[in-house]
Structures are given as C-alpha cells and as structure tokens.
Amino acid sequence: MRLLPLLCAAALAIAVGPAAVASPGPAAHPSEVPGLTGAAATAAAGPAADKFRQLRVANAAAQKHTFWGPEPQLSTNADGMVATHSVIPTLRLSNRSDVVYAPTMKPTSHSCIEVVTAYGLGQAPQLWAWDWCKSVSPAKVVPIDTAFLSKYTTTVNGRQAYTIQVLRTNASTNSWTASLYNNTTRAWDALFTQSGSDKSTLNEGWDIFEIYATHNNATGSAYYCTDARGAVFESTAIQLRINGQWTPATATNSPLRPTATPRPADYDCPTLKFQATTPNSAWRVTV
C-alpha cells in the first residue's frame, strides 16, 4: 500500500509470470477467495491496518516509513493492473510496531482497491483487499496459509508467488474488482469488488516494497532487516490495461519512486539490494 507520505465480453490473453493467464470477463469468477470480511477483517489486520491508513502524515520519530517501486502515473489512464507477487510464508517480524507491505499494488489514482501482502504483528503473512472508496480499511483479509499456497501460488524464479489482477469493470460507477488466479482450476477467483470515489488523495498507482520500521540499537539497523535477512520480495510481469490493451509497465508509464537508485541507509538496512530486473515490469528487493 502506497502509504508513504503512502496500493467485457471476451477474455483477453495475457502473459503473466511463467505461463499465460486469461484475463477475467464478466462471468469469469466461478468461485470466491475465502477470507475474513467486515469487523473480523479489521480485527485480523490489527495495528498494521492503522499504519496503512496514515496517508501523507509525518511518522513518529522512532519509525522509518518509506517505499520503492514503479508507480503508474495519472496520465497513463490505466483502468487495470496485473502482476505476480512473491510471498514468504515463514517470515515473522519481531517488533510488533513494524510492518512490511511487499508487494502492494494499486492500479491508478482512481482505483477503489489495493491488494497488499502484509507482514507484521509477529504473525503469519496476510493478503489484504484494501477498500479505498468506502470503508478505507482492509475489506477482506486472507491468511497466507497452506490452503492459500496450494491453490493460488506457483513457483516463479524459485519463489512462491500468486498472480493478482485489479480491473475497473464499470466506468460510470467507478467499480473495481480484484481477482486471484487459481492454479488448481485455471480460473480467476473473485477477491473483492468496490465502487465509488477513491479517497487515497494520491495521483498515481503503484506496485511497491514498503516499510514501517523501528531502529534496533543492538544491531545498528531496523528490526525487519535482521528478521528478513536473505529474504527476497519480488514482483514480476507487471502490466497495465490502457485503452483496453495490456502493456508492460515501463520507465515512461511507471517510473520508479521515490528514486530509481535508492540508498539502503534510507531503509535502515545496509544489506538491501534494489533491482529493476525488467524495467519497470519486474522488480526485486533482497534483504
């Protein structure tokens, strides 16, 4: 989630990750992704959701909040985005104040939905469908557990990864639908649908690595830097739907923000390595 001072009749065919995945049409959701909704989703997300809600607000001095990755610009006029995101099922953060959202994706400044891979609270990772148009909260929370991994992930570059798509399905109501690709049924499962006016106040979309981190005086770096040592956060096959056509994210339509060449020191983690592996449709952050 970009919290930095802050995420049809015939199916199109698009190349996503290691194989071709069909883009969903109006009847392309034979099933729905199971997960928590409403108050249960908010409770499951906990304080991690509170941080996500702090748009363009100064952070407490004790915490560092920053991000990195491609950001589709308002002028791009995208009405959809698809990407394949890695997950790290075993990652736990030792400091309960800290959160890593990576990757987190929102197609455009108009989108009602951001899809977030969230690590924090000392618990297992979660997948969120964040509602930017109505509740401004995690509208659906899905645990990244064994059931999720077996149904929605495959191996990409040696890592478990899921493919997510967020599409505007009705321009007049600004209605958006997020879907996960089900590798068992080879179909898209609906995750969340919302319509209305985007309340994020941001003029771009994003597919990024984002942190809220606390410095550990004992190690000289942030807690997450030690917790995730050797971990890789990765997004591949990022595509935008522009004027009805799918096109890869590029340096022109999705520049890297806040800079193309970030300094590890700005993330309080000297071992960080940032790579735009396929500029700008694939990126990798190694801890």
Image (cartoon, rainbow, N blue to C red):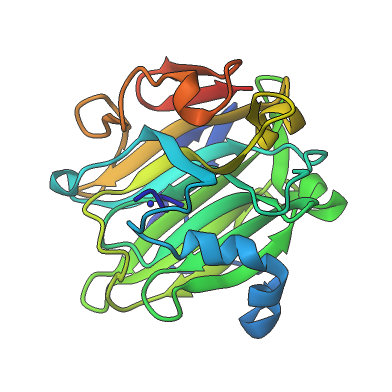
> Of residues 278 and 40, which is closer to you in this image?
40
The quarter holding residue 114 reads: bottom left
> Of residues 270 and 162, which is closer to you in this image?
270
Residue at 28 percent of width and 26 percent of height? 250
Whether residue 8 appears in this view of the structure is: no
Q: Residue extending furthest right?
A: 146
Residue at 73 percent of width and 56 percent of height? 121
Residue 263 spot, x, y in % from top left:
42, 19
> Of residues 287 and 30, which is closer to you in this image?
287
Tag count: 0
Residue 34 spot, x, y in % from top left:
72, 69
Left or right, 50 with reference to 167 = right
Residue 245 spot, x, y in % from top left:
26, 43
> Of residues 15 and 55, which is closer to you in this image?
55
Whether residue 85 appears in this view of the structure is: yes
Left or right, 56 with reference to 203 = right
Q: Residue extending furthest left?
A: 75
Residue at 66 percent of width and 74 percent of height? 41
Position of the C terminus, as image quadrant, is top right
Left or right, 272 with reference to 157 = left
* In the depicted structure, whether residue 161 falls above or below residue 130: above
Residue 219 spot, x, y in % from top left:
72, 24
